[in-house]
Image (cartoon, rainbow, N blue to C red):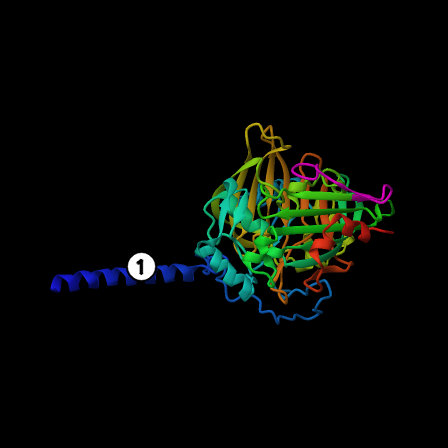
Amino acid sequence: MKTQYRITSAVLALVAAIGLASTASAQKRLPWGALRVGNADGSIPAWNGGLPPDTAPAGFKKDSGSWADPYADDKVLYTVTGKNVDQYASKLTEATVEMLRRYPTYRLDVYSSRRPANYTTFFNDNAQKNAAGRCKTIEGGLALAGCFGGTPFSVPKDGYEAMWNMLLTNKGDSVWTFGQAWYVDAAGNKVMTGQLANRYQNDYFNPKLTAEKFYAEGGPYYMNSTVYTAPARMVGEATMSRKWINPIARPDRSWSYNPGQRRVRLAPDAAYDFPVATSGGVLFFDEIYTFSGRMDRFDFKYIGTKEMLIPYNSYKYFSAKADDLLMKGHPNPDVMRWELHRVHVVEATLKPGARHVLAKRRYYMDEDIPQAGGFDAWDASGKLAKGMIAPAAWAYDKQVVLASGSCYFDLNTGVWYNSSVMGGANGLKISVDEVDSATFYSPEGLMRRTQR
């Protein structure tokens, strides 16, 4: 009897110890997987709750399409230029290092690191359910099953899981973006290549749905419609895309509308390394929002985490007009804010026999806001050919990520492209109205929206 008691006590003690360890481990990470603590020297702070939804800095007007900077009083800590870039190179993308060496006018003003992310209860509850085992990759990482409403993989085990975290960054379930696409040639000449009204919808984050309902509808995680309102030659042109959580079972679809032909047509080439028309060849379709579409042409390897300087809390950038933002070779350093953050690193290598202009890309994704960061890209000869930065900020009243207007750099030609300059336009409207997705994101709906 005594022996039985001693064994039972030992087992109970072990179970209690495991439970405490599990609780302690959970407390180290936030529901979306980011470490709660800061780094050793404090240059990356501990998460302190983020920005509350009632944040209202001076000048903020709700649903105006822009967000006032809650950190406007912060001062520059230090500046990185071509002269001291070697000191910071290990914390920068390779493309950023190259650009700092190439352009004396380029610099990185580094500020105190701030962690504003503060997701909704809906998001956090679903992220925890995903982490508890309902969420998994299928089809060799190319599709998801069971995931819904929050970060799919709080602690990614491989490159595909990390990429799905980025693909499912919470930018809001329903968003209107009003901005302008700009191309800057090697001489510094600026060309507005498209003024657009862009509608984006992601039912993965629709709080009116359940996981069961989302999958019953096919798992539509990316529905996008763009109508061009300028320049004159493009007025009335439009594109539309639909992407599903399982692109094997339900392949991605894209359409285009040409007002001269007055017809909506399938656009089967609008994928992978097919160039986006307004970018002058700088932006590929699989680089929209850093990465977009199927992952079947590359092998994605999770490298780990590291501390890097990335554009962050980019409120001034998003409010800047084209003349204030665009310079020869790079964005105006005066409107940029760089911070030190922990990022997940994924390396994508072209599969043998697969076709793509780029042979390798390396992605950098912030732990709190996966959309923040960017990528480096190499061509078939192994030469660094391209770079991209994805400035991001936090839409505090909506509790989602503010991400639009990324910068893409062709290092071979010196040309670069900004996909959506919002300053001076109507900006970005998040969850301000609803549409019937079945009719809005249909060829018939696209045609109705494009009539002159």
The image shows residue 200, relative to residue 276, as above or below, that is below
Q: How many marks?
A: 1
Residue 232 counted in the magenta span:
no
Q: Position of residue 370 (x, y in %)?
A: 56, 52
Q: Residue at x 73, y 37 (%)?
A: 281
Instruction: Please determine whether, in this image, residue 383 is positioned above or below residue 2.
Output: above
Q: Does any portion of residue 106 appear in the rendered image? A: no
Compared across the picture, whether 358 is left or right of 306 comes to right
Residue at 74 percent of width and 53 percent of height: 421
State whether the magenta stretch is mostly helix, strand or loop.
loop
Work out which residue is located at the far front of the displayed protein and give it.
216
**Residue 267 is inside the magenta segment:** yes
Residue 255 visible within the image: yes
| Quarter that holds the N terminus | bottom left
Residue at 47 percent of width and 60 percent of height:
30
Residues in magenta, as a range: 257-274
Q: Nearer the viewer, residue 56 or 78?
A: 56
Name the residue nearer the viewer: 151 or 406: 151
Residue 175: image x %, image y %?
A: 69, 58
Q: Which residue is mark 1?
A: 18
> Which image quarter: residue 5?
bottom left
Direction from residue 436 to residue 111 in the image, left or right: left
The front one of 336 and 198 is 198
* In-image side of 424 versus 204 (left or right): right
Percent x, y of residue 253:
68, 43
- Label 1 packing within 10 angstroms: few (<14), some (14-19), many (20+): few
Q: Secondary structure at mark 1?
A: helix
